[in-house]
């Protein structure tokens, strides 16, 4: 792609590569300057009698419900 661009623009390959590298580095800087993505947690709750304290027990309860 760089060689094709160099031929079309009638510029040396080195100049095309340097321009592409500069543009890419500037773009990376722009991405870092963006705001960080945040999620807003929502309490979805559990059914009565379920607890997240013991994950194995919760999984066995859930699998038991599915097999019924």
Image (cartoon, rainbow, N blue to C red):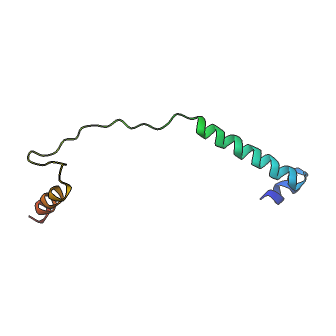
User: Residue drawn 63% across and 37% down?
Assistant: 30
**Residue 52 appears at what percent x and percent y?**
19, 49
**Residue 9 appears at what percent x and percent y?**
87, 50
Whether 65 is drawn above or below 50: the answer is below
Image quadrant where one finds the C terminus: bottom left
Residue, far front: 53
Whether 10 is drawn above or below 23: the answer is below
Number of numbered tags placed on the structure image: 0
In the drawing, does residue 44 fall left or right of residue 15?
left
**Residue 66 appears at what percent x and percent y?**
14, 62
Whether 23 is drawn above or below 14: the answer is above
Image quadrant where one finds the N terminus: bottom right
User: Residue drawn 70% across and 40% down?
Assistant: 26
In the drawing, does residue 47 fall left or right of residue 5?
left
User: Residue drawn 16% across and 55% down?
Assistant: 58
Answer with the quarter of the image where residue 61 lies: bottom left
User: Residue drawn 65% across and 39% down?
Assistant: 29
6 and 53: which is toward the camera = 53
Whether 65 is drawn above or below 52: the answer is below
């Amino acid at each position: 792609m760089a060689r094709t661009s160099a031929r079309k623009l009638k510029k040396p390959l080195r100049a095309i590569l340097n321009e592409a590298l500069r543009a890419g580095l500037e773009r990376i800087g722009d991405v870092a300057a963006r705001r960080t993505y945040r999620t807003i947690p929502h309490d979805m709750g559990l059914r009565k009698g379920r607890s997240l304290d013991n994950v194995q027990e919760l999984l066995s309860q859930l699998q038991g419900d599915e097999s019924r």
